[in-house]
Amino acid sequence: MGYVKSGYASRPNKRAKKVTEKLYYEHIAKLRNRETKSNRNRQGSERSRLRLQDLSRDVLERIFVFSGRNSPLPLLNWHFFKCLKPSQYLIEQYLRVNFVFDVNAALKPSMSSSYRPWWVLADCALEVPLILRFLNASPSFLDFIDEIAVLEDVEATQQLRFEQFNDKTLPNLETPLNTPELNPTTEKSLRDFPATVYKWPALFFQNDIFTKPVVYNQLLLRLHSEYAIQSPSLTAESVMQWFFIDTASVTLQLDINCLFFALNLITHLSVQNKRSFEDVHPLIHFIDFLYISVTPRLLPLLLCEKLQDQHLISARKAKIVGKFIRKFYSHDLSLLCEDDLWIKLNEVKDHTLVERVSGFGGKPGFNVVK
């Protein structure tokens, strides 16, 4: 039947595609083996080469901390940026290494038990918003700091202290680097707070007003030993601007009582001794925000969101203005006769408000009446 073996055709299927077996020659195989071996050696050397980003996170953090104030390490790539993401621990270590120095360190080897360190915080640290936020969250960090001063060349400063001590021109190891300039009347510092403090108005509102006595912002109170607000009226106006206008997008639960405590803190931190303002402009701005400016969420801020009657709302506003006058102008009620104030009252045209100001002795001047 055409089969040599039963079940197997003796002639190939002409429709089936013939499969040609691949032939491998010895010299080709040897060359391939030789290339494979060299590739493996090269890959092994590359695998053994250690890269900076292969280091552990704690090692990278230490490298970053000791690489100085302007290290670009977090900006090199996404891996470094993620590993060096600011944390309370990393910021503290960075601050201790790059901004806190013992200016008596050169004296330590030559002294024994009489040695006393003098820790100085470089004032430029307070110009960094991230560091300021860390100090606000951990104000106790400043407890061991003896002085906040300009510190440009640390080694030169330490060497100068060493020479002054040996020359007997340094009275003792606790002598500050700079003699503070004080107001002759109030004996408060003439050194103004860093600009970063004023750019962060919410800092003045971070007070615990529900405790007795009230616990005010601990960072600002600690810094008050070195700084004082030189323009309390301008600071108050900036804080009121933030409270009435800029808090529309803030999730903080604030009301008019928070503002009064913030203003009270400003007067305490000011270079003057009085818990009051020396000009009428803060009062004018306060009235403007209550009556004229378009203030979002005004009624909730004044705690009168449930009031519907306009007469009750007007009475509430006038009462709040009276409290403002009583707290910050009772030392000199003659300021209530300033022409600028009465020009603003004429602009408001609220009889209840005029009566409230007049009740404290305020009277319009001749130039306003005519």
Image (tube, helix red, strand yellow):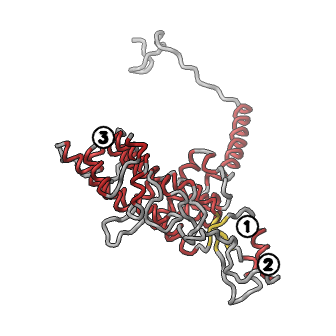
Q: Visible in this render: residue 276?
A: yes
> Residue 31 location in percent, x, y?
73, 35
Which residue is the site of mark 1? Answer: 154
**Residue wearing tag 3:** 349
Mark 1 crowd level (few <14, some 14–19, many ≥20, 10 Å Cα): some
Question: Looking at the image, which residue is at 42% across and 19% down?
Answer: 8
* Label 3 SS: loop
Query: Which residue is most to the top?
Result: 14
Mark 2 — residue?
164
- Viewer-closest of 232 and 32: 232
SS of the residue at dot 1? helix
Q: Residues within 10 Å of mark 2 (few under 14, many from 20)?
A: some
Q: Residue at x 56, y 49 (%)?
A: 81
Residue beneath the point at 57% across and 72% down: 187
Q: CA distance from mark 2 to mark 3?
A: 68 Å
Q: Are marks 1 and 2 in contact (CB under 8 Å)?
A: no
Distance from the alpha carbon under mark 1 to that under mark 2: 15 Å
Q: Is residue 241 visible?
A: no
Amino acid type for the residue under numbered disc 1: Val
Of residues 176 and 349, the one nearer the viewer is 349
- Quadrant of the image for the N terminus? top left
Asked which quadrant contains residue 39, the reply is top right
Question: What is the three-letter code of the residue carrying label 3?
Answer: Lys
- Viewed as shown, does residue 156 lie left or right of 101? right
